[in-house]
Image (spheres, rainbow, N blue to C red):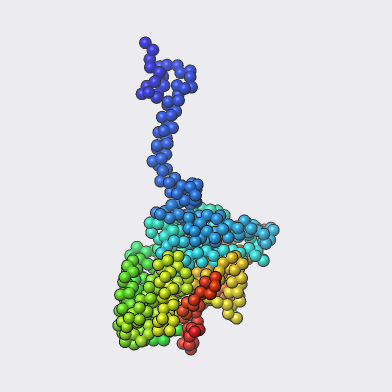
Amino acid sequence: MNPPRFLLWFIPNPKRFHRRRSDWLRLGLVLVLLLGTVAGIWGGPWLSRRLSCNDGFPTGDIWRAGNQCVGLSSGPYAFDLDAFAPVMRVIDRQNQAAADKCDPSGTPVTVGVLMTMTDRFVGGRAVQELEGMAAGQLRANGTGCLHPLRLVVGQLGEYGENGDPIGVARRLAERDEVVAVAGIGLSQQSSAEVADILAGAKIPMVADLITAEGFDQSGSREDQPIYSSCDPDITYPRGIGKDYYYRVAFRSSVQIARLGAAVPGRPDFIMVPTGGSDPYTCTALPVMQRQFGGNVTEVKFDSEEASTVPQTARRVCGAPKDVTVAYIARGRDLGRLIYSLDEAFANGQCAASSVTVVSTSDGQRLRAAELDPVLEDLRVRALRSTSFTTGKVRLVSALVGGADRATPDNPNFAVFEQAFTEAGFDLSHADAGWAVNAYDALITVSSALRALPASKEVHRSQVNTAISGFSSAGQSVPGAGGLITFDNSGNRVDVPPVVRVCPLPPASGDRPARVTSVPVGPDVAASCPS
């Protein structure tokens, strides 16, 4: 009796001589199925995270984190976010045309842009930030360009389960062609880790929005910050991005000092969110208390629960006098506070004669249209409310950058405006300051590149050395917010302007209404135009 051809149905019996290729088909089929199953178990999550973004084309540069697409894009792909599609198309076109006006012998460079497009603390300003980067790229590749500059945009996602800042930063750091990074995100613990990853790869970075204490190379040692209100597992008190980190945004301590000089008297309240997870607020609170002698009454609200903001407004309204509220919370909740104060005045439930809200720079968020329709409705209602229009409720805020308009002593703001409009963006998007600071961050990098020989390859260390050299008036960056120089910790030298935010006028034709401001100071009337 002949032995069976197969063992276990699919294994060719070694006791028989197999002449036909079809005898091995069963074994091959089983092996393919087995390998496919193992690959699916091992690589399924990786593949599914990448198939769900970038129109279903799997790539190592783009993946899903929670319910959002994150990663790197140097083309028109906008991470499935419609609001960013127009500016990403502009960057794609500019990347392709980068060398058109540059020195023909110039070696091209790539600069990374790291930002969160979707975190709840950014709103519509994130689009404006990226527009500022695109305008900076247009300026960098214009007249006098030595090195064609291309951008790769990194979407970090939210600071939580719907984001992956660390993964995106690592992916960017692996790209040898990236010589510098502009942006890096918000004042968050994850941003501190991002800075250290980039510094480990010797990539110089110019942050555009980070203002919190601790977020410089020395941990803000000269400001003598106090971190007792913050989470216990933070790393930024030791400093971040050693030797490679700079920021064009004014840090909280100089903002608060300027607010104290511009607004006379002592605040009646400090409005602050509960918890210590947000470095922007937990590091600013002790600085604010110290600025005004300590023991200022702290009025807290829950940033996760909107109903607590009107409760805070009623607390502020209890004092029968002109009330000043120091606001060091995120701007996301400021529109609701001003609207709640107006309601209290309208209903006869506010004993205060007037309320002046004094805010650090995130208060400028009220000058940017919100992507969330609920927040946008609150913003518009607040800025057009009777109490805000008549001045019974006022908002005074530091600027995140050095300017929000062209002035005779700052001609570079007009240069920014020209680049911004030439790139196809609306100038109203510059009012909140994020576009200005993003532009200045990229101009800082491009100014460093213009100091390097055109015909030689650009190295990260050369860019870093050039940026660190911007340390005096004679060696400074011609920013839209003024001339930019850095101290030994990577902080911007100089102090921010303080302005009063004016009411929102009605829209005129097809043009969006712009929220203007007027300067504030001890000898300045700070009256908004009627």
* Residue lying at 31% horizontally and 85% vertically, measured from the top left: 351
Q: Residue furthest front?
A: 509
Residue 439 shows in the view? no
Residue 331 position within the rendered picture, expressed as x and y whole percent measured from the top left: 41, 71
Question: Which residue occupies 41% across, 64% down?
Answer: 120
Residue at x 39% of width, y 24% of height: 10
Camera-side residue: 501 or 284?
Answer: 501
Residue 53's place in the image compared with 427, above or below, is above
Residue 105 placement: quadrant: bottom right
Judging depth in this view, the residue of 512 and 119 nearest the camera is: 512
- Quadrant containing the N terminus is top left
Q: On screen, 389 above or below 424?
A: below
The picture places residue 271, in percent across and down from the top left corner, at 35, 76
Q: Residue furthest right?
A: 104
Seen from this angle, which residue lies furthest top? Answer: 1
Tell me the residue at 42%/66% (across/down). 373
Disc tally is 0
